[in-house]
């Protein structure tokens, strides 16, 4: 082993507990040489598989592929998690360099004709019929992945596809870094007089943010969702709400070095060319071909079915907001920066529900415990905090997860607070996937949030939406933790994009149950449980403002599918966005949940491109799935939970997604459950 290898903590066995990366020993300068060695090692492994003189078998080809690239996977997991959750200029420079290089590396593998010939031989050979169900699934998915990556293209087409993927990787990295730069740089300074009318909890969060940023102002609002949305909800200063809202919605569209419009246009053109090289008319046709939806037509049918009811509901909500504003003597027409402010007033009037009164009952630690309790009741899991593990930031917490027998299941990391080194939003990721091919390898998963810290001695307090986000991402974490498969490529969240949100969205339902709120929603000062009347109000208000919420989400999903299904043909993407919204009659007073210039779901890589609809598709499933518990009269029914674990949370990609849902529920759902859940039907 060379001296440089010994000195690089990414390339040697980790002498840490539970396999946690040795974060304290890892510096930015370790990543380039680690990536170089890991990709070289992976190339050598691939070359050996492709050049094997023995006849192709599942073992020497498919299983060998599953075992290849372990060093690269380990290095990549550490790097990409840090690049999202705790980055700096040095890591961003490496990200810009490595994104296209890694795209080329993976393209070279899927373009390897000799390798694909072996995969194809196993797929077509007699052995395929004798494989067990999990092996068959791995074989089918591997073969399909290579075909979809261009394995059957000619040499010139493969070369062009590689160039496209390299360029897309570069552009996606630039896009995400531009959004982060805009989020980092923005501050709305507030004087003491500007915070008048804000609940103390919101004012305290803005004061703490000013202190952390070293601002000359006494209070600061940033573009962290957990800070800007409460400000838009509670600030009586309409001028400041407008300033904050315009900054929030114009990320990536401010001109100069961080403007994303040209990047978006280039990415869309390259995606269109990529799809056509692979034999598809549009990028949406390509992306949706191996999903539950299968086609853009199916996606549009779902979106078009929900849109009229959502828009009608939003129109009714707007009328109430306008009437309230006028009754208070405000001579205004409701604008997007007014919606949350007046909606909160309407909620108070209709449900006697004040979000500022709810938050003291939703302390972050209590909501974490509530999520753990729910997982324990459903799946027999226990969570013990580990304070002896060196992690990548002082705010990150670690919990060892065990099952009902006390056996180690995995490690859960919670990274809950906003900071300038973290991109916005909330997500789940893995440092290590569960598998049994390389031994009994247990998962390490992480939830990343952007909640505001508490002020002074007060604990961090969540809005109900924040608490729902925590449960949502923890549902993803459980999908990774409960995985019970042999092969890495089937592990955890390795399912179709329009199925992957089922475990997360389904888990949200338990937050609203009386069993959970009644036990864990306690006032952070007095310890008193949330009053029954407040729980009743929260439950009654679940469909409040669902017209607004559905319209802001659906509009983003519709623009996404329009961009990728042939309607866009170059030009200004923001102008296209405006035209798409005009076509569907987008209410002027509501903005897309993610406007195009900062729509990271679809432009920071291909992730949800043509797939933002999947949250709604999965919601059709999750509404029906939770009904399975309600129908038996017990939201923690053991038999139903056991089926849920077997076919959804623990199954990874073992089965076709429709087969998995049928295994759990016995039938496929209708859209009626979704419409009822959102209050869009009577």
Image: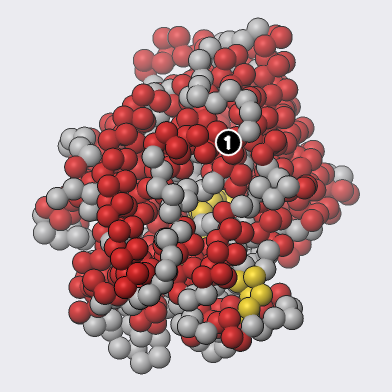
Task: Tell me the colour scheme of the image.
Answer: secondary structure
The furthest residue to the right: 3
Decide: few, some or many residues near mark 1? Use Cα within 10 Å; few <14, some 14-19, many ≥20.
Answer: few
- The residue positioned 48% from the left and 76% from the top of the image is 236
The furthest residue to the left: 632
- The residue positioned 47% from the left and 48% from the top of the image is 592
Image spot of residue 313 (x, y percent): 27, 51
Q: Nearer the viewer, residue 572 or 220?
A: 572
Q: Is residue 362 above or below residue 268?
A: below
Q: Is residue 450 above or below residue 589?
A: below
Of helix, strand and loop, which one carries label 1? helix
- The residue positioned 44% from the left and 49% from the top of the image is 588
The furthest residue to the bottom: 526
- The residue positioned 70% from the left and 35% from the top of the image is 262
Q: Nearer the viewer, residue 429 or 410?
A: 429
**Residue 516 visible to an observer of this rendering:** no
Q: Is residue 51 above or below residue 319?
A: above
Q: Nearer the viewer, residue 519 or 288?
A: 288
236 left or right of 156 in image: left
Q: How many numbered marks, from 0 up? A: 1
The furthest residue to the top: 154
111 left or right of 531 in image: right
Image spot of residue 506 (x, y percent): 31, 52
502 left or right of 431 in image: left
Image spot of residue 89 (x, y percent): 79, 56
Dividing the image into 4 quarters, which one contains the N terminus? Answer: top right
Q: Nearer the viewer, residue 402 or 398?
A: 398
Image spot of residue 96 (x, y percent): 76, 42
**Residue 312 visible to an observer of this rendering:** yes
* Residue under pointer 1: 575
């Amino acid at each position: 082993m060379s001296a440089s290898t010994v000195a690089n903590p990414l390339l040697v066995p980790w002498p840490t507990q539970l396999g946690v990366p040795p974060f304290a020993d890892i510096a930015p300068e370790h990543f380039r040489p680690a990536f170089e060695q890991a990709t070289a090692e992976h190339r050598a492994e691939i070359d050996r598989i492709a050049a094997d003189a023995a006849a192709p078998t599942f073992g020497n080809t498919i299983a060998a592929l599953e075992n290849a690239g372990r060093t690269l996977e380990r290095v990549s997991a550490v790097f990409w998690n840090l690049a999202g959750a705790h980055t700096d200029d040095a890591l961003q420079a490496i990200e810009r360099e490595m994104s296209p290089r890694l795209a080329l590396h993976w393209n070279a593998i899927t373009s390897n004709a000799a390798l694909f010939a072996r995969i194809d031989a196993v797929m077509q050979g007699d052995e395929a019929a004798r494989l067990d169900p999990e092996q068959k699934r791995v074989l089918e998915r591997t073969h399909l992945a290579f075909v979809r990556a261009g394995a059957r293209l000619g040499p010139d087409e493969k070369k062009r596809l590689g160039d496209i993927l390299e360029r897309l990787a570069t552009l996606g990295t630039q896009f995400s870094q531009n959004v982060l730069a805009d989020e980092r740089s923005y501050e709305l300074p507030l004087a003491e007089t500007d915070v008048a009318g804000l609940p103390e909890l919101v004012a305290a969060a803005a004061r703490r943010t000013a202190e952390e940023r070293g601002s000359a102002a006494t209070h600061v609002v940033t573009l962290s969702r957990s800070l800007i949305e409460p400000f838009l909800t509670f600030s009586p200063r309409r001028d400041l709400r407008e300033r904050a809202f315009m900054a929030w919605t114009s990320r990536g569209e401010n001109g100069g070095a961080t403007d994303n419009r040209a990047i978006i246009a280039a990415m869309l053109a390259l995606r269109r060319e990529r799809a056509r090289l692979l034999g598809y008319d549009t990028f949406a046709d390509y992306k949706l071909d191996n999903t539950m939806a299968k086609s853009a037509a199916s996606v549009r049918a779902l979106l078009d079915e929900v849109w009229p009811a959502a828009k009608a509901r939003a129109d009714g909500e707007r009328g109430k907001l306008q009437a309230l504003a006028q009754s208070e003597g405000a001579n205004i027409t409701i604008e997007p920066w007014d919606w949350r402010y007046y909606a909160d007033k309407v909620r108070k009037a209709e449900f006697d529900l004040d979000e500022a009164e709810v938050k003291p009952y939703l302390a972050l630690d209590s909501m974490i415990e509530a999520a753990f309790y729910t997982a324990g009741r459903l799946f027999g899991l226990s969570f013990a905090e580990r304070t002896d593990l060196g992690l990548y930031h002082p705010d990150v917490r670690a919990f060892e997860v065990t099952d009902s027998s006390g056996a180690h299941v995995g490690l859960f990391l919670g990274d809950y607070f906003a900071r300038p080194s973290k991109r916005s939003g909330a997500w789940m990721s893995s440092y290590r996937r569960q598998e049994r091919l390389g031994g009994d390898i247990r998962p390490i998963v992480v939830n990343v949030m952007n909640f505001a810290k508490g002020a002074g001695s007060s604990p961090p307090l969540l809005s109900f939406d924040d608490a729902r986000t925590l449960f949502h991402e923890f549902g993803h974490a459980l999908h990774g933790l409960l995985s019970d498969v042999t092969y890495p490529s089937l592990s955890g969240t390795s399912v179709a994009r329009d199925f992957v949100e089922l475990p997360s969205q389904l888990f949200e339902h338990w937050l609203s149950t009386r069993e959970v709120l009644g036990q864990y929603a306690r006032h952070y000062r007095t310890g008193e449980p949330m009053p029954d009347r407040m729980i009743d109000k929260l439950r009654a208000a679940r469909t409040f403002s669902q017209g607004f919420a559905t319209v802001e989400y659906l509009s983003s999903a519709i623009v996404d599918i329009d961009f990728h299904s042939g309607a866009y043909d170059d030009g200004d993407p923001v102008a296209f966005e405006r035209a798409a919204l005009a076509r569907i009659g987008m209410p002027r007073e509501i903005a897309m949940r993610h406007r195009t210039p900062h729509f990271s779901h679809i432009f920071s890589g291909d992730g949800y491109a043509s797939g933002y609809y999947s949250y709604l598709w999965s919601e059709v499933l999750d509404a029906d799935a939770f009904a399975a518990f309600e129908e038996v009269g017990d939201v923690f029914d053991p038999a139903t939970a056991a089926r849920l674990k077997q076919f959804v949370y623990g199954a990874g990609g073992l089965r076709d997604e429709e087969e998995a849902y049928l295994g759990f529920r016995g039938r496929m759902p209708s859209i009626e459950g979704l419409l009822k859940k959102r209050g869009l039907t009577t």
